[in-house]
Amino acid sequence: MSIVVKDLVKFYGKQCAVDHASFEAGSGEIVGFIGPNGAGKSTVMKIICGYLSATSGSVSVGGFDVKRQPMEVKRNIGYLPEHNPLYPDMFVKEYLAFAAGLYRLGSSAKQKISEIVEATGLGNEQHKKIGVLSKGYRQRVGLAQALIHDPAVLILDEPTTGLDPNQIIEIRTLISELGKSKTVLLSTHIMQEVEAVCRRAIIINKSVIVANASVSDLVKEHDKSLEDVFHELTQ
């Protein structure tokens, strides 16, 4: 399995943000990770990426332990956080070259940047400063940096935030294509997005995972739409 989370616990002071969470996600699988605001989604994602340390439990990515082998994990993971951190004074292509340098892509960087610019629809924006881009295009730049080193695992936290309907379709199509060969953990508040691109859904509520099943099984078991299932399990 590309992502293995076992008995994960995270406390902020006395507040429990993640309560004994366990799940797995394999290669070629797009998994929707959904829950209300404050349920613990972003905390779990940050722990998987190595940005936060767990209170207890374990996480591995591609067979590497997040706590003991953080650099190996980061080489195998691409992360788009909910609040996309970018350098507004950098040009798009300059920023992607900077990201490629961080991953030490060397002589392959130029070709990789060209491929990612094309894949994320940034061709007409690549010579503009990030600060003048629309929110949708800034989101594309964030997705491009997550993909620049061709990671085996993608962690995407609200990847279509701020996109118009046409851009949402384009990014969903790209995620679906990436999910054929990579492990994708996708957090979103849009149930139609989960239904459109995810094979499986993990629902977390008040720090506890309350469902982990295929989207079709969840809908069939509850005899409701995924959105209604979500509301039922997160009341």
Image: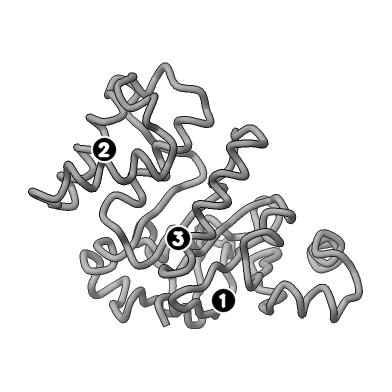
Q: Earlier in the sequence, mark 3 or mark 1?
A: 1
Q: Quadrant of residue 92?
A: top left
Residue 43 image offset from top left, x and y in percent: 51, 58
- Where is mark 1, residue-wise? 21
Identity of the residue drawn at 71% across and 76% down: 211
Identity of the residue drawn at 36% across and 50% down: 146
Identity of the residue drawn at 66% across and 78% down: 212
Residue 124 image offset from top left, x and y in percent: 39, 25
Looking at the image, is 185 positioned above or below residue 118?
A: below
Looking at the image, is 70 positioned above or below residue 216?
A: above
In front of the other: 166 or 78: 166
The amino acid marked with disc number 3 is Leu
Q: Are marks 3 and 1 in contact (CB under 8 Å)?
A: no
Q: Quadrant of residue 127?
A: top left
The amino acid marked with disc number 1 is Ala
How far is disc 1 from disc 2 in space, using C-alphas? Answer: 34 Å
Q: Quadrant of the N terminus?
A: bottom left
Q: Earlier in the sequence, mark 3 or mark 2?
A: 2
How far is disc 3 from disc 1 in space, using C-alphas? Answer: 26 Å
- Label ID, residue 178: 3
Nearer the camera: disc 3 or disc 2: 3
How far is disc 3 from disc 2 in space, using C-alphas? Answer: 19 Å
Decide if residue 85 is on the left or right side of residue 193.
Answer: left
- Label ID, residue 96: 2
